[in-house]
C-alpha cells in the first residue's frame, strides 16, 4: 500500500487498503465469534454440571 502511495497510484493504494481492512475485520469477527460461542456453550455446560 505504501509503495502505491509513494508512486501516486491511488487506485492500487485503495485496493490494498480495502484488502487490509477486510482481513483485519474478518479476523476480529472470528475472535468475537469464538468468545460468544464460549459464552453461550460454556454457560450451558456449567448449568449441566451444577445439576
Image (tube, grey):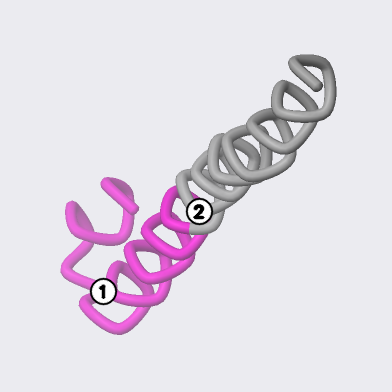
Lateral position of residue 4 relative to residue 32, left or right: left
* Magenta extent: 1-25
Residue 28, compared with residue 4, is above or below; it is above
Q: Between 48 and 18, which is closer to the camera in this rendering?
A: 48
Residue pictured at 31% horizontal, 60% vertical: 4
Residue 22 image offset from top left, x and y in percent: 46, 64
Residue pictured at 64% horizontal, 32% vertical: 43
Q: Which residue is mark 2?
A: 29
Secondary structure state at the residue bearing disc 1 = loop
Residue 22: mark = none
Q: Between 49 and 38, which is closer to the camera in this rendering?
A: 49
Characterize the local packing of mark 1: few (<14), some (14-19) or many (20 or more) Cα atoms within 10 angstroms: few
Secondary structure state at the residue bearing disc 2 = helix
Residue 31, compared with residue 19, is above or below; it is above
The quadrant in which the C terminus is found is top right
Residue 12 image offset from top left, x and y in percent: 37, 74
In the image, residue 15 lies in the stretch drawn in magenta: yes
Q: Quadrant of residue 41?
A: top right
Q: Between 34 and 41, which is closer to the camera in this rendering?
A: 41
In the image, residue 20 lies in the stretch drawn in magenta: yes
Residue 47 image offset from top left, x and y in percent: 71, 28
* Residue furthest out toward the bottom: 11
Residue 36, compared with residue 35, is above or below; it is below
- Looking at marks 2 and 1 on the same chain, the residue that comes earlier in the sequence is marked by 1
Residue 17 image offset from top left, x and y in percent: 33, 63
Q: Which residue is mark 1?
A: 9
Residue pictured at 37% horizontal, 59% vertical: 21
Q: CA distance from mark 2 to mark 1?
A: 30 Å
Lateral position of residue 15 relative to residue 4, left or right: right
Eye-nearest disc, 2 or 1: 2
Residue pictured at 55% horizontal, 35% vertical: 35
Q: Quadrant of residue 39?
A: top right
Amino acid at each position: 500500500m505504501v509503495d502505491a502511495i509513494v508512486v501516486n497510484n491511488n487506485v492500487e493504494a485503495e485496493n490494498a487498503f480495502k484488502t487490509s481492512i477486510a482481513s483485519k475485520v474478518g479476523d476480529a469477527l472470528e475472535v468475537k465469534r469464538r468468545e460468544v460461542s464460549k459464552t453461550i456453550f460454556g454457560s450451558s455446560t456449567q448449568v449441566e454440571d451444577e445439576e
